[in-house]
Image (spheres, grey):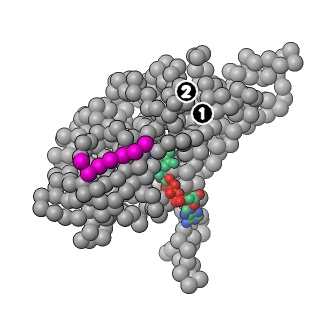
Amino acid sequence: MRAFPPAKHDALGLEELLTPAEREVRDRVRRFAESEIAPIISDYWERAEFPFPLVPGFQKLGIGGGHLQGYGCQGLSVMGAAMAAVELARVDGSCSTFFLVHSFLATLTVGLLGSEAQKQELLPEMADFRRVGCWALTEPSNGSDASALATVARRVQGGWVLNGRKRWIGNATWADIAVIWARNSETSQVNAFIVRKGNPGYSATKMENKIALRCVQNGDIKLTDAFVPDADRIPGVSSFSDTNKVLAISRIMVAWQPVGLALGAYDMCARYLQQRRQFGAPLASFQLMQEKLQRMLSTCQAMWLMAWRLTKLYEAGKLTHEQASLVKAWTTLRGREVVALGRELLGGNGILSEFLVAKAFCDAEAYYSYEGSYEVNALVAGRGATGISSIKPPRSGKVQVQA
Ligand SMILES: Cc1cc2nc3c(=O)[nH]c(=O)nc-3n(C[C@H](O)[C@H](O)[C@H](O)COP(=O)(O)OP(=O)(O)OC[C@H]3O[C@@H](n4cnc5c(N)ncnc54)[C@H](O)[C@@H]3O)c2cc1C
């Protein structure tokens, strides 16, 4: 495997919009991704295996606690954490998703909504990937309509008994802890629970035959009378609006992930067109190739700027759900276009996973559909634009107009 190509994608000098600390995180993660992930990852992707030999490298990277402060967490800025997600995705979409699920879903839920005892016990080890988390919201029958979840938590002496099924849960087959979202049978509200590895009521089966993010071990979880002690109920969750507090932040990271994929595909193509010759000249000298390459580059700049503005709005405390959805929908849409152009530029090699563009091409499909599909995010953004919600079918022909 040849070295990952150098970063040539910053045509507009956008890195000037980052602080020195954010650039430092970017460079640190970039070095790890280029030197440790790139040489081995396509084999793992082909075999649909998680690259466990990379875990010690993740442990030293100093990103696992994301933007949480204290309890051993690194207290990155949200933008700094986003740079980590981007640099991982630039080389490998699955590694970026591993980081996202662990840090911006599982760890974040404990940090935002956990008890003092849960934070003290779990965060120091989660902050450096010594304990890995998964985050289980989606169910076989409740995907986009996640708030309708049917997993039940029933109160018993000393704790709770969980029954239900979850689907698509990243890291589920090997995680040390699972954050399980379940409906409280007394209140009918959504609550959250920490289910620990080895709980006899928990089982997870790997989902096979994915064409995207093949290294991420997505699992089908079964909860069969899984007992969870009171101490492992997450006390800051009393309804689905608390779930949304986590998703509001993780959606920013998801909006950045296709930016990373697109930047990596661009860098790969920029080098390839210089090196590959046809008709006695480098591919880079052909006008049609240049047009596609510059289209990738300009779209990368626009995607980066949209995601940057989204993050700045969040950091300023001004971000709305509609704005987050607007950007997530758009970057995942454009990310798909950029990697498709990249796949074209490489000709036959564009469908070989070892060139990494083909891998990015496939991985973009997952980004488009998860953490709120393109369509659902587009409808949330459409609600922002019109004041009319069209996500749920109108009852008896009436449309719901938001104030
Ligand atoms: C690789 C991957 C990793 C994931 N990891 C996790 C994880 O770690 N934890 C977790 O909890 N979940 C995870 N998910 C689940 C993910 O968030 C869901 O797949 C997503 O929310 C969409 O749900 P669904 O796949 O059931 O599609 P569905 O909800 O069945 O939607 C199918 C299609 O219908 C469209 N649709 C649905 N409702 C509407 C509507 N109102 N209007 C218009 N169109 C609509 C959708 O946009 C989509 O095109 C993961 C998914 C994938 C693919």
Quadrant of res 181: bottom left
Judge whether 250 appears above or below 272 on screen. below
Residue named by callout 2: 42
Query: Can you name the residue that lies furthest to the right here?
Result: 279
* Position of residue 242 in the picture relative to residue 302 (left or right): left
Q: Secondary structure at mark 2?
A: helix
Does the residue at mark 2 contact the one at mark 1 (Cβ under 8 Å)?
A: yes
- Packing grade of label 2 (10 A; few <14, some 14-19, many >=20) is many
* Position of residue 355 in the picture relative to residue 78 (left or right): right
Q: Secondary structure at mark 1?
A: helix
Q: Residue at x 20, y 54 (%)?
A: 227
Q: Residue at x 44, y 28 (%)?
A: 51
Judge whether 382 appears above or below 90 on screen. below
Residue 312 coordinates in the image, percent (x, y): 47, 45
Give whichever of discs 2 and 1 has the lower sequence position: 2
Judge whether 182 appears above or below 187 on screen. above
Q: Give the residues in magenta.
A: 200-206
Q: Amino acid at mark 1?
A: Lys
Query: Can you name the residue that lies furthest to the bottom here?
Result: 396
Check if residue 151 falls in the magenta segment. no
Q: Nearer the viewer, residue 402 or 284?
A: 284
Using the image, tell me which numbered label, if any, was put on residue 359.
1
